[in-house]
Image: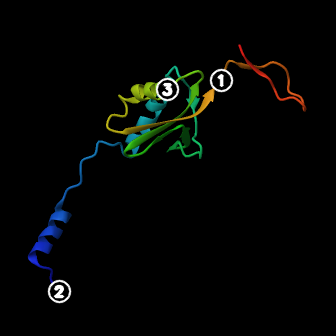
């Protein structure tokens, strides 16, 4: 049974639509975006390093290697970091977003702070079976 003219016109209009033009990176453009993003993140003073994420999925696979801590898809960049203690976590995220903004224009940037690096902690005496380690700030 042939549909009525209004149904045919609506179907033709749906199929004739052109897809929206995207400025998101694709293929090799994603590969070229990863390394500068990593460099920008590691250049942040509040970032101690990159982290693979809680489930290990914050990874970008490049030819022959994996880049841990940054995952770039067609519409977003996920950045997983270890922050330096003491840092306000909002400041860490703000600093990272500002650092990668020129590289990720048009993409959503997710920042996940997975851990804190506490470099100023020392163990005052070795732990024993009866006593846990005592940690002191220098």
**Alpha carbons under labels 2 and 1: distance apart:** 72 Å
Mark on residue 92? 3
Give the alpha-carbon distance from disc 2 to disc 3, as whole Å. 63 Å
Q: Secondary structure at mark 2?
A: loop
Looking at marks 2 and 1 on the same chain, the residue that comes earlier in the sequence is marked by 2
Front residue of 11/29: it is 11
Picture quarter with the N terminus: bottom left
Q: Earlier in the sequence, mark 2 or mark 3?
A: 2
- The residue lying furthest to the bottom in this view is 1
Residue 1, label in figure: 2
Q: Is residue 36 left or right of residue 117?
A: left
Name of the residue lying farthest toward the left:
5
Residue at 66% x, 20% y is 119
Element class at badge 1: loop
- Asked whether the beta carbons under mark 3 and mark 1 sit within 8 Å of each other, the answer is no
What residue is at 37 percent from the left and 34 percent from the top?
A: 104
First along the sequence among labels 3 and 1: 3
Residue 15 lies left or right of residue 103; in this view the side is left
Question: In the rendered image, which quarter contains the C terminus?
Answer: top right
Question: Mark 1 packing: few (<14 Cα in 10 Å), some, or many (20+)?
Answer: few
Q: Nearer the viewer, residue 84 or 103?
A: 84
What percent of the width, then of the height, locates residue 51?
A: 58, 36
Q: Is residue 81 above or below residue 60?
A: above
The residue tagged 1 is: 118
- How far, Cα to Cα, is label 3 from label 1? 15 Å
* Badge 3: residue crowd in 10 Å (few <14, some 14–19, many ≥20): many
In the rendered image, residue 70, in percent from the top left (x then y), is placed at 50, 38
Q: Which mark is residue 21?
A: none
- Indicate the position of residue 47 as horizontal and vertical percent values: 54, 25
Farthest residue to the front: give it. 130
Residue reaching furthest right? 129
């Amino acid at each position: 049974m042939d549909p009525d003219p209004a149904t045919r016109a609506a179907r033709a209009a749906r199929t004739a639509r052109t897809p929206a033009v995207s400025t998101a990176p694709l293929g090799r453009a994603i590969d070229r975006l990863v390394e500068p993003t990593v460099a920008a993140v590691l250049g942040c003073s509040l970032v101690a390093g990159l982290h693979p994420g809680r489930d290990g999925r914050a990874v970008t696979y490049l030819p022959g290697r994996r880049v841990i801590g940054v995952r770039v898809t067609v519409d977003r960049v996920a950045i997983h970091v270890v922050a330096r203690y003491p840092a306000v976590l909002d400041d860490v995220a703000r600093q990272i977003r500002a650092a990668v903004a020129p590289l990720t224009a048009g993409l959503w940037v997710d920042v996940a702070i997975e851990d804190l690096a506490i470099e100023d902690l020392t163990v005052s005496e070795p732990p024993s079976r009866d006593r846990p380690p005592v940690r002191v700030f220098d």
